[in-house]
Amino acid sequence: MQLRDKIRHETDLQRRPRTGKGGDQVVNTKVTLSGLTLDNPVIPASGTFGYGYEFAELYDINILGSFSFKGTTKEPRFGNPTPRIAECPSGMINSVGLQNPGIDKVISEELPKLKKCFHKPVIANISGFSVEEYAYCCERIDKEEQVGIIEVNVSCPNVHHGGMSFGTSPEAAAEVTRAVKAVTTKPVYIKLSPNVTDIVSIAKACEDTGADGISLINTMMGMRIDLKTKRPVIANKMGGFSGKAIFPIAVRMVYQVAEAVKVPVIGMGGVSSAEDVIEMMLAGATAVQVGAANLVEPFACKNIIEDLPRVMERYGITDLNDIIGGARK
């Protein structure tokens, strides 16, 4: 048996979903995001799952609720200089720099390849360096049948206003939201940065200008210095810190935002287990994205999905929809 087949066989034996006497699953893991029903709330986060087909070589990715593909910009981007990754206790720092082939190739090449292995609506993650670029890319991707939700990453620098991230002010985030909603028909979720003083005011500004949902949190800013060279480990000096260490911060921010807005929230940040998914949903998330864990364990999302019914049973949960925001009630 080849190594890949052996891995697939062994993981198929792990964490099988709990079933009733008739073989039917005894818990309901389905959730709904802006009219889109997901079989479960587990979604690989943008930048950690590529365009899906790489992971499809390891397991059937159709078990996922959905997934958010690699951040896409108008023009192709090579990304930042290397090294781009720095290890940290309970996490990692990355400064990839939105490396992607550009919106045209994503539509003409990546989505057709993805369609062969993923048969559910996908989440399109869109980035931009001007309001016009966001609008252009969102209008293009909105026409793609495979796309169910557009996730707009407002952590990008605004090249027309001194490089300040769109996601650091309610006004800038609202401007992007308004422009994108004017040219799209599909649900738009704004992905927020945690590197702000008041994330709630930014979330509310996005909701007020038409956002159908909010995704949070993006990575936090971090830095490592090599003691031997006495220089920053990452060529770009600083990067996005992600992994288990940021989970409590993510839970706190999801709780605050979900309490303040009426639109659905997708929670993320340090999620690595089925228990984390439940905790994030209790804080107010309707669905949960898994990021850095995919880079450590390629089967992370598969394992979480298969373990979810067991964890639900353990805590007396029969329907995930009943616990959304439960910690606030």
Image (cartoon, rainbow, N blue to C red):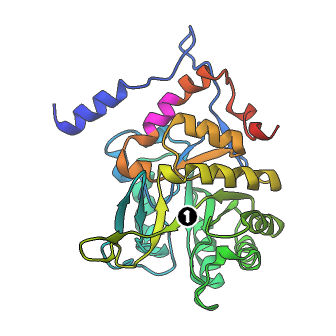
Residue at 64% over, 34% down:
30
Residue 18: give x, y in percent of width and height.
52, 19
What main secondary structure does the magenta stretch of the protein show? Answer: helix
Residue 132 among magenta residues: no
State left or right for residue 3 relative to residue 288. Answer: left
Q: Nearer the viewer, residue 25 or 292?
A: 292
Question: Where 301 sits versus 108, above or below?
Answer: above
Residue sticking out furthest to the left: 1
Amino acid under disc 1 = Asn
State left or right for residue 153 relative to residue 118. Answer: right
Q: Nearer the viewer, residue 311 or 59?
A: 311
Residue 281: give x, y in percent of width and height.
67, 41
What is the quadrant of residue 176 in the picture? bottom right
Residue 133: give x, y in percent of width and height.
59, 82
Residue at 45% over, 71% down:
239
Q: Nearer the viewer, residue 258 or 178?
A: 258
Indicate the quadrant containing the N terminus: top left, top right, bottom left or bottom right.
top left
Determine whether the residue tagged by mark 1 lies in a helix, strand or loop.
strand
Pointer 1 residue: 125
Q: Nearer the viewer, residue 11 or 141?
A: 11
**Magenta-colored span:** 302-307
What is the quadrant of residue 228 in the picture? bottom left
